[in-house]
Amino acid sequence: MSDPQAQPPRDPSYGEPTSREPNVGQPGAGQQAGPPIGQPAGPPVGQPGGQAGGPPPGTPYANPVVAAPLSEADDRQWASFAHLGGILSFLPALIIWLVFKDRGRFTNTETKEALNFQITLLIGYVAINVAASILAIVTFGIGGLLIGLAWLLWVAGVILSIMGFLSAKDGRGYRYPFALRLIK
């Protein structure tokens, strides 16, 4: 017979009682912690009052958090990257403008300038290619000479983008000599 006052055997490595039966009502092997049986689990994660830290039920959603403003060094850095990204196309300037336009005044101004210049170059590329295609069809090959203009336009874009990068890196604004000011 067992003594009711006797302690269960202890595991020497942990110093805790060992038992052959899992504790009733507590998560054990194969069980998950959760609400008691018959009670709802609560709102899903991401819903108001859910585990993701949303507002309690019945309260309106809070306004989105505004990102911190850029430091002066970061402001110059992103503005200069917008100009340098013009070597690739208009996408780097567009992405930088969309992400940082509200965080830094210098970045906002310079990315708009770089983006306007890159859009102007894109319009030039399209116009040259359309004209070259039409001339190639009509004159049976002379339109290919216009493709050289596209290369000159690209070289000018690279040189002016590097000049814009160097100017913005030093904290000075850069104004491209030719650009349609589509984004104000």
Image (cartoon, grey):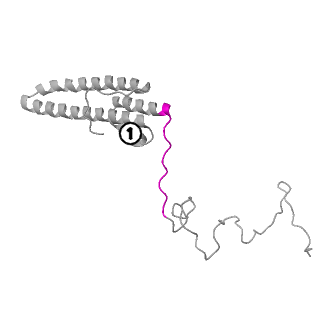
Q: Residues within 10 Å of mark 1 (few under 14, many from 20)?
A: many
Q: What range is drawn magenta here?
A: 60-74
Say above or below: 146 vs 67: above
Q: Say which residue appears at 53% left-offset and 68% top-offset.
A: 57
Dividing the picture into quadrants, the one containing residue 134 is top left
Whole-percent x, y for residue 153 in the image = 24, 26
68 relative to 33 in the view: left or right: left
Is 124 located above or below residue 50 in the figure? above
**Rendered location of residue 180, percent (x, y):** 24, 34
Residue farthest to the left, as pictured: 138
Q: Based on the displayed image, in which of its 4 quarters is residue 42 positioned?
A: bottom right
Rendered location of residue 71, percent (x, y): 50, 35
Residue 109 x/y as whole percent: 37, 35
Q: Is 36 left, or right, of 172 in this rendering? A: right
Q: In the rendered image, which residue does mark 1 sit on?
A: 97
What's the magenta bit mostly, secondary-structure-wise? loop
- Looking at the rendered structure, the number of numbered marks drawn on it comes to 1
Q: Is residue 72 magenta?
A: yes
Q: Please say whether residue 138 is one of the residues in the magenta stretch.
A: no
